[in-house]
Amino acid sequence: YYKRFQVSLALTVAINLVKMVFVKVTKSKAYYKRFQVKFRRRREGRTDYRQRKRLCCQAKNKYQSPKYRLVVRFSNRQVICQIAYSLIDGDRILTSASSNELPRYGLNVGLKNYAASYCTGLLCARRLLQKVGLDDVYEGNDEVDGNIVSTTVGKTTYYVDEVDEDKRPFRALLDVGCKTTSTGCRIFGALKGAADGGLDVPHSEKRFPGYDRDSKEYDADMHRERIFGGHVGEYMEYLEEEDNTKYQQQFASYLADDVEADGLEELYEGVHEKIREDPSPSDKKGFSPDKSFKRKVKKTLEERKADVQVKKDAKNAELEESDDDE
């Protein structure tokens, strides 16, 4: 019996050895020694380097003339538009505008919606053209109608009304970062504002609000309504009728500033006019620290020990009183 058991065990082991498959080590030590990590901002998911390369690389026969970018970013509270160009040691900002500056021009609420994005892009464009001395040559589109303006000179298409013979328009390419460029995105509100402000930003109507992908038709009136906050006004009227409590809560800042749904278009028209009158940045306020505040002097070791002893004595006295009461 014992011999039979040994024979069966040996056969089982032999069969298992035959069934074993050789597994190749794909990631060997040599793989890890040669592994190169991606750029830091790629690992953080903050920079699309494939996009950045195409926005920054310039032909060598252009003699170091930079490619300018219209950078549009959204934070939790504001819209930021910048005109930037890249050098070997980093980017340089030519000018910038933020929706936090819009209260100067009469807009105190809704600083991150589509209409505010348009105003910020307009402010950035007018500020840049004033800085480079092109604000009188290229005034942009005063009548906001949602249509795309372009002029072809030779083989080049410029996205402005007219091209001056002496000075060409200032061209900037839209930099959206890692944001999803869906139809009706607020990024394109800033783009439209910059284009109406006189910048030459190559674009089409395919991502503007009002474009129908199936019929390939563009409704400029819908885009104009979005620029003047029509969608916000419609929602305000709807919410006021359906749920007044939620309306009072959600549009509390609008009500505190006496902004109603009917007056939004007039409000934004006034903001556009004021931006064109004076797009220059406000004066920086000097920082004056509060010198009256003084830190408490750090206690010495003897003082800290004395404080501990006082607490111990108080606790001991309290325990003695409780023992006496019992």
Image (cartoon, rainbow, N blue to C red):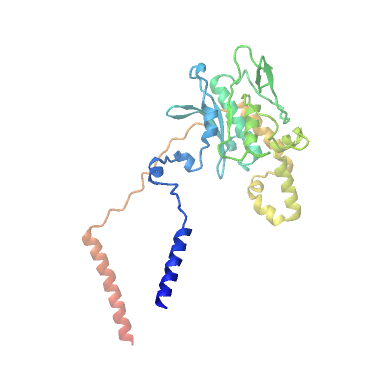
The quarter of the picture where residue 82 lies is top right
Q: Nearer the viewer, residue 72 or 18?
A: 18
Residue lying furthest bottom: 326
Residue at the far top: name it.
166
Q: Is residue 49 visible?
A: yes
Q: Residue at x 66, y 49 (%)?
A: 251
Say left or right for 325 vs 22. left
148 or 279: nearer the viewer: 148
- Front in this rendered view, residue 7 or 74: 7
Question: Residue 231 location in percent, x, y?
Answer: 72, 42
Name the residue at 43% across, 49% down. Answer: 25
In the rendered view, does 28 fall on the left or right side of 310?
right
Q: Is residue 322 above or below residue 303?
A: below
Q: Residue 135 falls in which quadrant of the image? A: top right
From the image, which quarter does the N terminus lie in?
A: bottom left
| Spot occupied by residue 29 in the image (x, y as percentages of width and height) | 38, 46
| Residue 195 position within the rendered picture, expressed as x and y whole percent measured from the top left | 64, 27
Residue 106 in sight in this render: no
The image shows residue 7 at horizontal and vertical percentages of 42, 70
Residue in view at x 59 percent, y 26 percent: 126
